[in-house]
Image (tube, helix red, strand yellow):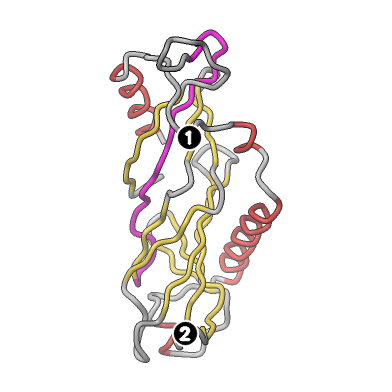
């Protein structure tokens, strides 16, 4: 996350602090009050990961699901992240089996949880698709000091292959929370929204 701070600092100077509100302004109150449905999904992802860790239930590859008898949940650990496999089901609409997966973790040095979920279809009888993406369950913020915060926005994904999590394609926004910086619209009229700078980046380590 230190790299994220450096990126946001550079963006701060790059945009010369033009306090104009971008399209789709972020409401921090909404970010801080995650709907129950999403909260339950995040809790389920964390619970499944803990169950895998406690049992040491790890496999080497997604292909192992079809190569032996698997008791779910199981995980694939790659680097600092764990891809958790919840269940394997047959989708009658597409006539293929589908495997449901999650990835959840806390930001280093903080309590904020970021969680992803998704599914991948088995491409043929002998194996699984070699790659896929999990979607962010709910936006999450991480404060940068007392004057700004970094928001991980909807549309952020976690890429994976048969061996686990590969990278994160993040859609983010740096939001100034200081009351001393008052944003304005394109006509120079002050608004009630926060100054924000949206940007995208890819990380192998969050």
Marker disc for residue 24: 1
Q: Position of residue 11 (x, y in %)?
A: 32, 24
Residue 119 vs residue 166, the one in the foreground: 119
- Find residue 46 and report its image quarter: bottom right
Q: Position of residue 4 (x, y in %)?
A: 38, 33
Q: Residues within 10 Å of mark 2 (few under 14, many from 20)?
A: some
Image position of 34 with respect to 193: above or below = below
Image position of 144 with respect to 206: above or below = above
Q: Secondary structure at mark 1?
A: loop
- Quarter of the rendering occupied by the N terminus: top left
Q: Residue furthest front?
A: 187
Q: Residue at x 43, y 88 (%)?
A: 66
Q: Residue at x 58, y 32 (%)?
A: 27
Residue 72 vs residue 39, the one in the foreground: 39
Q: Position of residue 156 (x, y in %)?
A: 43, 49
Residue 113 vs residue 26, the one in the foreground: 26
Q: Which residue is mark 2?
A: 97
Residue 137 is left or right of residue 61, and the answer is right
- Distance between the Cα atoms at labels 1 and 2? 37 Å
Residue 57 is left or right of residue 199, and the answer is right
- Find residue 77 and report its image quarter: bottom left
Residue 52 is left or right of residue 6, and the answer is right
- Quarter of the rendering occupied by the C terminus: top left
Image position of 21 with respect to 173: above or below = above
Residue 33 lies in the magenta-colored region:
no
Marker disc for residue 64: none
1 or 2: mark nearer the eye:
1
The number of callouts visible is 2
Q: Which residues are magenta?
A: 162-183
Q: Secondary structure at mark 2?
A: strand
Q: Residue at x 47, y 61 (%)?
A: 82
């Amino acid at each position: 996350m230190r790299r994220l701070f450096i990126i946001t600092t550079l963006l701060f100077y790059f945009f010369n602090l033009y306090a104009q509100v971008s399209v789709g302004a972020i409401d921090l109150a909404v970010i801080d009050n995650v709907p129950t449905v999403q909260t339950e999904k995040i809790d389920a992802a964390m619970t499944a990961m803990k169950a895998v860790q406690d049992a040491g239930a790890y496999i080497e590859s997604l292909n192992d699901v079809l190569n032996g008898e698997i008791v779910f949940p199981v995980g694939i650990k790659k680097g600092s992240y764990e891809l958790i496999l919840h269940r394997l089901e047959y989708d009658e609409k597409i006539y293929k089996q589908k495997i449901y997966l999650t990835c959840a973790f806390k930001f280093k040095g903080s309590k904020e949880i970021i969680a992803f979920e998704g599914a991948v279809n088995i491409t043929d009888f002998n194996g699984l698709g070699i790659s896929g993406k999990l979607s962010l369950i709910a936006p999450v913020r991480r404060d940068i000091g007392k004057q700004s915060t970094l928001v991980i926005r909807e549309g952020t994904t976690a890429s994976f292959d048969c061996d686990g999590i590969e990278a994160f394609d993040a859609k983010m926004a740096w939001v100034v929370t200081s009351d001393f910086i008052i944003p304005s619209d394109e006509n120079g009229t002050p608004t009630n929204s926060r100054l924000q700078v949206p940007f995208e980046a890819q990380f192998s380590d969050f």
